[in-house]
Image: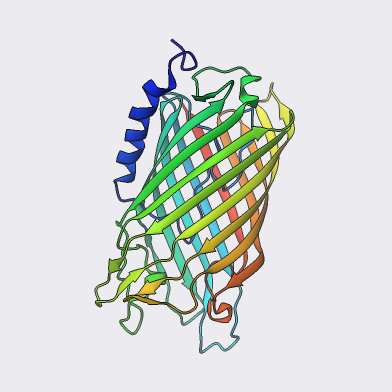
């Protein structure tokens, strides 16, 4: 019996239980370096944004290997070489996804972070907190229903929705000490406590070649007690990420497709709190613009783009060098392959 014909309530309760169970785990935070966006390799159908989450679930029984690089080049505020500032950071994310059903996909992500200062500063490198992530897919076709297994190209034009959630397992090192023996939570490779990510997506093909995508998400952190006795909770993150994706070129005989995309990304960060007090030079609002290009070849997808802050309203902005909103730009690269 097809998913369309079978009553939605028979699927919804166990699916939601599965998502809630997933959220009960602890996972690596996507925070402070972007939410992993999955581009499922496909020559036809809706386009996928570079960085925002999309409403595409993985095909039943298929695996997706995923790699992302988010390289941040920071603006420097002080030219004095005796006061080294953050120079750049590389945030790598490797992951694997599996289509548990046509309407539920599960992912595991393993990040590796490099946070590099100017000469004489404090550099850190290492694996960060592992993440678990689940996505539940729906479509609207004379009513809300779970994503079915087999669909025509006309069916792919329906409104698409997902709800997703994840959590971070504190596997990174949250107690990295600098040259003076002090712990800097912002330069550590782990958060020391779980964070919880929840959100939803909306996707709609507007024309044969144009796709609209929207992600709304929230990432919240638990308090952590560091080895020096301080207790810190990072500020909650809220993201609004719309996108337009234009299918520019398709060659079915060569299994090739080329898309251009434009993603404005709004991010609101709450203040960090240490020992119950608000931290200076943390939190604020910012708007990024991410133009990019994605190429599909057979079951492989490659995407790249440049993300720049176009508006910021940061708390004590002149003291937030090396944080989000103070980049010159961020270089985004993703690779994914769908198999078997």
Camera-side residue of 164 and 188: 164
Question: Horizontal placement of 228 versus 36: left or right?
Answer: left
Residue 284 on image: x %, y % = 54, 69
Whether 145 is drawn above or below 239: the answer is: above
User: Is there any visible trace of residue 19 in the rendered image?
Assistant: yes
Camera-side residue of 141 and 264: 141
Question: Horizontal placement of 81 versus 2: left or right?
Answer: right
| Residue placed furthest toward the top | 1
Whether 207 is drawn above or below 151: the answer is: below
Question: Horizontal placement of 251 versus 90: left or right?
Answer: right
Camera-side residue of 118 and 273: 273
* On-image quarter of the N terminus: top left
User: Is there any visible trace of residue 44 in the rendered image?
Assistant: no
Residue 131 on image: x %, y % = 37, 49
Which residue does the image show at 58% across and 52% down from the upper left?
A: 240
* On-image quarter of the C terminus: top left
Which residue does the image show at 43% across and 65% down from the upper left?
A: 235
Camera-side residue of 114 and 31: 31
């Amino acid at each position: 019996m097809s998913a369309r014909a079978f009553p939605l309530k028979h699927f919804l309760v166990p699916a939601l239980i599965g998502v809630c169970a997933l959220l009960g785990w602890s996972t690596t935070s996507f925070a402070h370096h972007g939410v992993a966006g999955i581009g499922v390799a496909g020559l036809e159908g809706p386009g996928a944004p570079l960085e925002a989450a999309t409403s595409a679930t993985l095909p039943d029984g298929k695996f997706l290997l995923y790699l992302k690089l988010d390289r941040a080049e920071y603006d420097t505020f002080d030219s004095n070489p005796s006061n080294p500032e953050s120079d750049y950071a590389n945030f790598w994310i490797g992951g694997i996804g599996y289509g548990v059903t046509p309407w539920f996909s599960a992912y595991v992500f393993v990040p590796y972070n490099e946070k590099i200062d100017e000469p004489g500063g404090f550099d850190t490198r290492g694996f960060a907190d592992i993440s678990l992530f689940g996505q539940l897919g729906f479509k609207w076709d004379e009513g809300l229903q779970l994503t079915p297994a087999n669909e025509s190209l006309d069916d792919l034009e329906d409104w698409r929705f997902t709800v997703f959630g994840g959590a971070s397992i504190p596997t990174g090192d949250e107690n990295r000490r600098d040259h003076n023996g002090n712990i800097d939570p912002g330069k550590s490779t782990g958060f020391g406590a779980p964070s919880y990510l929840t959100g939803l997506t909306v996707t709609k093909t507007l024309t044969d070649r144009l796709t609209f995508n929207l992600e709304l998400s929230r990432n919240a952190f638990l308090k952590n007690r560091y080895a020096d006795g301080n207790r810190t909770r990072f500020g909650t993150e809220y993201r609004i990420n719309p996108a337009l994706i234009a299918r520019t070129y398709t060659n079915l005989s060569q299994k090739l497709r080329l898309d251009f995309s434009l993603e404005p990304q709004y991010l609101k960060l709450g203040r960090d709190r240490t020992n119950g007090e608000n931290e200076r030079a943390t939190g604020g609002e910012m708007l990024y613009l991410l133009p990019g290009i994605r190429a599909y070849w057979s079951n492989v997808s490659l995407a790249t783009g440049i993300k720049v802050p176009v508006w910021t309203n940061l708390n004590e902005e002149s003291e937030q060098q090396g944080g989000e909103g103070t980049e010159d730009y961020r270089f985004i690269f993703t690779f994914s392959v769908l198999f078997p």
